[in-house]
Structures are given as C-alpha cells and as structure tokens.
Amino acid sequence: MASSSIPTSVPQKWRRPVRQRSRLVRRTGPAHSRVEFAHPSEQEFARFLDYYRIRWQYEPVSFPIGWEGERVAEMFTPDFYLPEHDLYIELTTMKQSLVTPKNRKVRMLRELYPEINVRLLYRKDYQQLLAKAGYSALEVQHLRQEDVGEILISPVELETRLRALGRKISRDYREQSLVLVGVLKGITFFMADLARQIKVPFVIDYLDLQRYAGAQPQERVKIARDIDYPIEGRHVLLVEDIINTGLTIDYVLSELRARKPASLEVVTLLDRPLRRLVKVPLRYVGFQIPNDYVVGYGLDYRELYRNLPFICTLRASVYDIPTVAPDPSA
C-alpha cells in the first residue's frame, strides 16, 4: 500500500512524469466534444475553457508521488493542463470525501515537483481563473456577460500575432525609419502593442476622421484632425483597427499620397474582405474575421467594450433596433 506521507528524499531519476494516451474519440466538432471525459464536470470545464479560447489538454501527464522500494505505487494525473499559462488544474467538488484525498495529492505533487504550477479548483474558483488568464474585464460597469457572444481572438492569439507582425515590419523596413499614422481611436491598444514589437526607428502621429451622411462616397468622410508630422519623402505605415468596405481607408490613402511620401502601406488588425466595395492594398493583416459585429481590444459599441482584452462578437440583441410594424388603422 502506498504511503500517505511525503517522501523526504526521492531520487530525481524516479520522478519521471509519464505521458498519458490521448483521450480523443472524434476529430470534428468543438474541442470539448472530442474528448472522452471521466466525469461530466470535466466536460463542463472544458466547454468553459473553449468559450474563452483558452487552450487545454486533458490528463496529458501522470506524476509518480508514491513508491514501494523503487517501484511506483501511486501516481497523480491532474485533470487539465493549460499550456499558455503553464498551469495544471485538478477539479473537485464540495464533497469532503473527494476534497481530502485530492488535497493530499496536490500537496505531495507540489513537494516532489516544486517547479510544477498546479491548482485545485472548485466551481466557485472559475472567475478567479478568468482573472488570472486576463478575462476579468467582463465585470466592467454597464457590461453584462450575456451581451458578449463568441470570443473570436484571445489575448494570447493577439499577443502572438502582433509579435509576428512586428518582426515582419522590422525586416521589411530594415535600416530605414518609419512614420506610424494611427486612425483614431479604435487603434489605441493595437498601435501601442504593435509599436513595442517594431525594432526600427519610428515616430507616431494620429489623424481623426469625421463621417457624414453624404450622397456620394467622397462626401461621407473628412479628416477632422490631421497629422502634425511632415511625411514627404518618409516611409509611412497607416495603422487601422478594421477594414470593411474600404471606402474610408481609400479616402485616407488618397489624402496621404498627395503629400508625396517615399512609400505608403497599410497595417490593419482586422479585415472583413466579404464587405469590400473598394479594392485597397493591405500590406499587413492581423486577422480576417466574419461579418459579425465585434468589440474589444479598442473596438467599441457606443464607446463601451474597448477595454476587453480579447476580440469578441456582440450579440445582435445589444445593437439591433427593433422595427415597429405600421399601425393599419393609422
């Protein structure tokens, strides 16, 4: 029988985690529907992780925690591993009969493998995990969680893609300098994070647009705040948050080209090619997205939702204006 006490000195060669076989039972559908879980609460937690686009692995590794002589007598297999946060999760319930042995195993795991980050998670701890992963901004004032639809791009995906964009821009403009021109104000977070990844010299400037209900496309947008920095003979990178029809960006590009920059390119965080009416040259694109209304990471709806750390869809019930049928008696 395995000892319940923590061994005081276990040779390192005995502490070899054992990779477990995959529990994948199908290759299509949402990730939480592809795995054979041992308990419904585990599938519920996997669905929770999928909703927030947090990558996970189910029972990937078993850790030896008890020995009889040199033979492994007891192992502990945490339920989930979150690779982006280097965190093992063991789920439990409020039943004391389950809590006590799981607490013992987690305590032994931490003692034997101090480099391992592991948490015993109760159902009430979900929100704390969200805060650790960067999703606690769902609790901002005037924002109801039911307003948010599907999360399209997670914080980790944003960080990874911006790092790649920064590397590419830095290579393309090697031994040159740039003028970054941001179109206010949805680019606030994108431009700040992208600028940190660019390794060539640059200056930053901004312009703001004012939109009208003009009859002709060229009458629908004007520059309300112009850039201060002269761009003639300079390499200019126009920074946009999202490209839809292309009409607005086409107007801005024509205005900037008239100032004779050495080059003029566009980097956009999001692109909706299905809505395009005017062909515009996009040198750098973060993500292509569907036609849903999206908010977060600088994008807003009536100035709300900009501070969400991810990009998500907004449920149609938030912005749809119900139509009133005409009164036949009127």
Image (cartoon, helix red, strand yellow):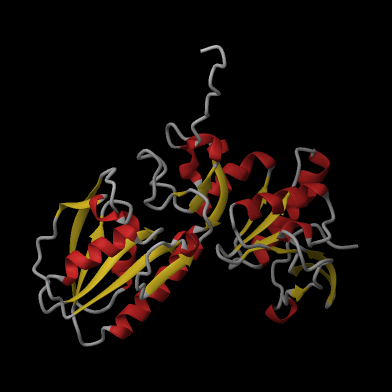
Q: Residue at x 35, y 40 (%)?
A: 303
Q: Residue furthest front?
A: 329
Q: Nearer the viewer, residue 198 or 229?
A: 229
Looking at the rendered image, the quarter that the N terminus falls into is bottom right
Q: Residue at x 20, y 52 (%)?
A: 222
Q: Residue at x 79, y 72 (%)?
A: 20
The answer to whether 177 appears left or right of 280 in the picture is: left
What x and y, as percent, mark residue 109? Answer: 69, 62
Q: Nearer the viewer, residue 172 or 272?
A: 272
Q: Residue furthest right?
A: 1
What x and y, as percent, mark residue 164? Answer: 42, 75
Q: Is residue 192 visible?
A: no
Q: Is residue 310 visible?
A: yes
What x and y, as percent, mark residue 190? Answer: 35, 60
What x and y, as percent, mark residue 13? Answer: 71, 82
Q: Residue furthest bottom?
A: 175
- In this view, 272 is above or below 22: above
Q: Residue furthest top?
A: 329
Q: Residue at x 63, y 51 (%)?
A: 51
The answer to whether 106 appears left or right of 197 in the picture is: right
- In this view, 107 is above or below 323: below
Q: Nearer the viewer, residue 278 or 311?
A: 278
